Image (tube, grey):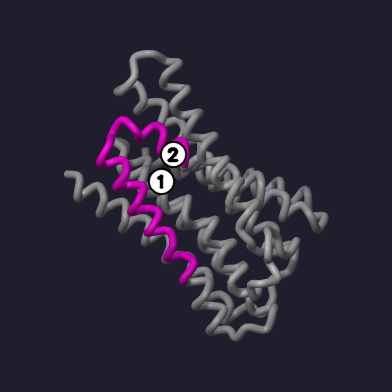
C-alpha cells in the first residue's frame, strides 16, 4: 500500500509538471506575450493555487488531524505550525537565494554572479517544488478525489506558467528551442517534490496534517509574496484581481466535481 501511495504521488506530480512543457510549446506560436495577457495568465494560475491551498490541503489536513488528535487545539496547532513553517521556509529561500522575477528583475544576494538564465531557473524551481510536494501529499491522504482535483488544478495552472516562462526567455534573446526546453525542465522539479511529499507522509501518517499545512504555506507565500505583487506592477489591477478570482472559482469547481 505504501509503495502504491508513493508511486501514485510521484506519477501525478510528474503529469502535472509535464503540462509546463505543454504550455511552453506555445513559444513556437507566440513571439511575445502582451503585458495584459501575461498578468492575466499568472493571476489565473495564482487563483488556482490559492483555492488548492484551502480546499485540497488545509481543509483535508484539519479533517485528517481528527484521526490522530483528540484535542481540537492540537489539530489546529499542528496544521498552523506546518503552514507557518512552509511560509518561513519559502521566505528564507526568497530572501537569500538569488532569482529573477518576470517583471521586477533580479532579487537576492550575489545575483550579478549568475546569468539571467539560471536566475529564471531558480525562480521557477521555487514555484514548482512546493506545488509538486502538494500533489504528493494530497495523494498520500485518504481523499483520492481531493488528490485528483489538486493534481488537475496544479497541472492546468502549469500550462500558462510554462508559456510565460518560455516567452520571457525568448524575449531576452534565447532561441525558441532553448526557451522551450528550459521551461519544460523546470516542470520536472514537481515530481521530485511529489516523491518527497508522498514518501514523508506514507512513512509517518501522523505528520500528514503538518506536511499538508507546510505545502499550503509554501504555496500561499508564492501567491502573496511573488505572483500578486508581480501582476500588479504594470497597472492591470482590475484584470489581475478578476482573473485570480476566476482561477479560484475554477479550482473550487474542480474540487467539488471530483469530490
Residue lying at the far top in this picture: please name it.
Answer: 71
Query: Could you say which disc has been placed on residue 149 in the image?
Result: 1
x 19%, y 50%: residue:
3
x 45%, y 30%: residue:
59
**On screen, 196 above or below 55?**
below
Residue that label 2 marks: 56
| Figure quadrant of the N terminus | top left
Task: Judge whether residue 150 is colored magenta.
Answer: no
Disc 1 to disc 2, C-alpha distance: 8 Å
Based on the displayed image, in which of its 4 quarters is residue 33 positioned? Answer: bottom right
Based on the displayed image, in which of its 4 quarters is residue 111 positioned? Answer: bottom right
Is residue 252 something that shows in the picture? Answer: no
Percent of width and height locating residue 193: 40, 54
Foreground: 157 or 87? 87
Residue lying at the far right in this picture: please name it.
Answer: 235
Q: Give the range drawn in magenta.
A: 185-214
Q: Is mark 2 on a helix, strand or loop?
A: helix
Is residue 213 something that shows in the picture? Answer: yes
Percent of width and height locating residue 254: 45, 44
| Figure quadrant of the C terminus | top left
Q: Is there a contact, CB below 8 Å, between mark 1 and mark 2?
A: yes
Percent of width and height locating residue 110: 68, 65
**On screen, 153 above or below 16?**
above
Q: Residues within 10 Å of mark 1 (few under 14, many from 20)?
A: many
Q: Which of marks 1 and 2 is nearer the N terminus?
A: 2
Q: Is mark 1 on a helix, strand or loop?
A: helix
Amino acid at each position: 500500500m505504501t509503495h502504491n501511495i508513493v508511486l501514485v504521488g510521484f506519477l501525478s506530480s510528474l503529469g502535472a509538471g509535464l503540462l509546463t512543457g505543454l504550455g511552453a510549446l506555445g513559444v513556437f506560436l507566440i513571439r511575445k506575450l502582451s503585458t495584459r495577457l501575461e498578468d492575466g495568465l499568472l493571476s489565473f494560475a495564482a487563483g488556482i493555487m490559492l483555492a488548492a491551498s484551502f480546499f485540497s490541503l488545509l481543509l483535508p489536513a484539519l479533517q485528517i488531524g481528527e484521526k490522530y488528535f483528540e484535542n481540537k487545539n492540537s489539530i489546529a496547532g499542528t496544521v498552523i505550525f506546518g503552514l507557518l513553517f512552509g511560509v518561513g521556509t519559502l521566505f528564507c529561500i526568497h530572501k537569500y537565494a538569488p532569482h529573477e522575477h518576470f517583471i521586477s528583475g533580479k532579487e537576492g544576494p550575489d545575483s550579478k554572479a549568475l546569468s539571467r538564465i539560471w536566475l529564471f531557473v531558480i525562480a521557477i524551481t521555487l514555484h514548482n517544488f512546493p506545488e509538486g510536494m502538494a500533489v504528493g501529499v494530497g495523494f498520500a491522504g485518504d481523499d483520492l478525489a481531493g488528490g485528483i482535483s489538486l493534481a488537475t488544478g496544479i497541472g492546468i495552472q502549469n500550462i500558462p506558467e510554462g508559456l510565460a516562462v518560455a516567452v520571457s526567455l525568448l524575449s531576452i534573446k534565447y532561441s525558441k528551442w532553448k526557451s522551450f526546453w528550459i521551461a519544460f525542465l523546470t516542470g520536472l522539479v514537481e515530481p521530485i517534490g511529489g516523491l518527497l511529499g508522498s514518501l514523508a507522509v506514507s512513512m509517518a501518517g501522523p505528520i500528514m496534517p503538518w506536511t499538508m499545512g507546510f505545502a499550503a504555506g509554501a504555496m500561499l507565500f508564492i501567491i502573496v509574496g511573488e505572483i500578486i505583487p508581480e501582476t500588479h506592477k504594470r497597472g492591470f489591477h482590475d484584470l489581475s484581481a478578476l482573473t485570480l478570482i476566476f482561477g479560484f472559482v475554477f479550482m473550487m469547481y474542480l474540487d467539488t466535481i471530483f469530490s
